Image: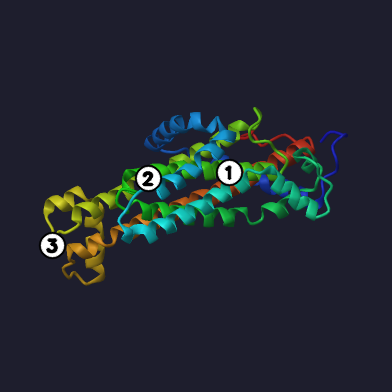
Amino acid sequence: MSTGAPEMSAYETQAWADLNDYWRRKAERRELPPKVSRAVEATSTKVKGAAATTGGFIRDITPQPVKDAGGVVLDWTFEPTVRAVVGLLELVTETVQEFTDADKVLDYHRTEDHDVQSLADLRLLDLEHLDAFTRTLALRSRFTGLVEGGAMGLLTFVPVAGSVAAIGADLVVMHALSTAIATRAAHAYGIDPTSDAERHHLDRMLRKAWAAQVPKSGTVKSAKDAFQAGAGRVRWSEKFRSDHRIAHAMENLLKQMGNGKHVPIEKVVTKMPAIAVVTSAGVNSAVLGSLAKTSVRYSQTVHLSKKHDLPLPPNLA
């Protein structure tokens, strides 16, 4: 530590030790298998361009799925469902707008009697004060992912409004949410995530979040396809089982629960929307919760490194 750096508090000393241990364990994890690595690389390429335009992307893109969902013309029986989905997506939009507003962070610290006029002033505060602001970020991120995922999973099954377009909208909204959460974590520790020095972390977080959603999209689409193909059917066929493995898997599961008794196809088909909702909500909740935790740890590490002139852990340098 340089002589010009402020003295670390007991809280910061313990936090620095814990953070270094966290990054060391993270670096020691085994590398991904080749097939998974190639998949991550492919999705990384897709998101790279979008992640480079962080600021305008959130404001310009996020509200659009809400407008799209609200603008479709449906049979009146679907109106309550679509209104519910639109309401949930509007909540997501408001969350994105709040999380990307640096003034919200400053307002919080002013209510705590901290003299801060800009993000740069946060770098002078003790880490304990900054951690108080992010303590519920992971929990709130998980809840937001749960809400958004459930809404988009349900929307997939609504005629016209759904189709594969809902899956695309889910990825767009998830990208905006991921960007917003990483941005909130950075702002909370006096960091500008759009600066040249920090953009690489934001891009890395978004690539990981994007890659984690690939299996989810396939499952949701498979459930929708099985739901559509099975509508009105009264008997199973080997071709249907072969074409829609997710329905066949559900049939086998229900058979096990029913001691091998025959399972009507309509009973399986009616389970498909629930599979899509649970999968989408569960994955999105886990992805955003994990991203929030990692982004906070990264921002804590950068904050302490700059404040006390400490070297970053090797895998972050």
Callout 3: 10 Å neighbours few (<14), some, many (20+)?
A: few
Amino acid at circle 3: Val
Residue 30, percent from left and from top: 48, 40
Q: Which of 20 and 45 is in front in this view?
A: 45
Q: Is residue 190 visible?
A: yes
Callout 2: 10 Å neighbours few (<14), some, many (20+)?
A: many
Residue 132, percent from left and from top: 72, 55
Residue 302, percent from left and from top: 70, 38
Say what secondary structure mark 2 lies in: helix
Quadrant (top left/top right/bottom left/bottom right) for the C terminus: top right
Query: Along the polypeptide, which appears first: circle 1 or circle 3?
Result: 1
Q: Which of 312 and 178 is in front in this view?
A: 178
Q: Disc 1 designates what residue?
A: 180
Say what secondary structure mark 3 lies in: loop
Q: Disc 3 designates what residue?
A: 234
User: In which image quadrant can residue 5 be found?
Assistant: top right
Residue 19, percent from left and from top: 67, 46
Query: Along the polypeptide, which appears first: circle 3 or circle 2?
Result: 2
